[in-house]
Image (cartoon, rainbow, N blue to C red):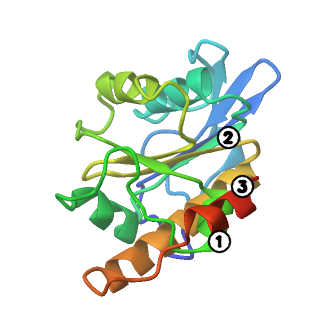
Amino acid sequence: MFERGLTMGSSGNISVKTEDGWLVTPTNASLGHLDPDRLSVLDQNGCLVSGDAPTKEVPLHTAMYDTVAGCGAIVHLHSTHSVAVSMLPDTKADDAIPPLTAYYVMRVGKTALVPYHRPGDPKIGDAIKGLAGKYTSVLLANHGPVMAGKTLEAAVYATEELEETSKLHLLTRGLNPRMLTEAQIAELTG
């Protein structure tokens, strides 16, 4: 993700569930230069067991794990096109990205937009909990995407699909692009 330019510097964070808690990237860690020995090991309640201090975004990870059924990993980035979509005044809170491609529908589904909160604010977790687990994909306004997946690989692939579809959405804005129909969406998700 770092090499693809989806996250820069020490921005973004990822987590993966384990049998007795979860692993999360430490605070101020670059996803391009992660040291496995420095990962933060958290218990089931999100409390640090070992490793470096965890990302300040633990509340958003906790909220996704608590509400999204089958969630085994979370990716949170500050990817350019997804952030740009989150800043547009007409982005829908319950359907932030239109169904432009089959792979967006299959890998991501629908994306929610939650209002802006400063990074690390526990209220981000409250906003995600307010979605009641209906979305595996969330855009944090003026901040970036949060993607839940059954596995880390699934969360990464869905995050990449969200970013590419956000780019397509921005490129076709105002051009009246052809969307997938309800029947086409049903065929992909049925």
Q: Amino acid at mark 2?
A: Ala
Horizontal arrangement in the rendering, residue 174 relative to residue 183 (left or right): left
- Which is more N-terminal, label 2 or label 1? 2
Residue positioned 49% across, 29% down in the render: 53
Residue positioned 57% across, 18% down in the render: 46
> Which residue in the structure is indicated by mark 1?
102
> Which mark is in front, 1 or 2?
1
What's the CA distance linking mark 1 and mark 2?
Answer: 23 Å
- Which is more N-terminal, label 3 or label 1? 1
- Secondary element at image label 3: helix
What's the CA distance linking mark 1 and mark 3?
Answer: 10 Å
Q: Mark 1 near mark 2, Cβ–Cβ under 8 Å?
A: no
Q: Quadrant of residue 173?
A: bottom left
Q: Mark 1 near mark 3, Cβ–Cβ under 8 Å?
A: no
> Which mark is in front, 2 or 3?
3
Q: Which mark is residue 73?
A: 2
> Which residue in the structure is indicated by mark 3?
189
Q: For residue 157, say whether it is visible.
A: no
Percent x, y for residue 115? 25, 39
Residue positioned 27% across, 48% down in the render: 141
Q: Residues within 10 Å of mark 1 (few under 14, many from 20)?
A: some
Foreground residue among 50 and 75: 75
- Secondary element at image label 1: helix
Horizontal arrangement in the rendering, residue 110 relative to residue 41 (left or right): left
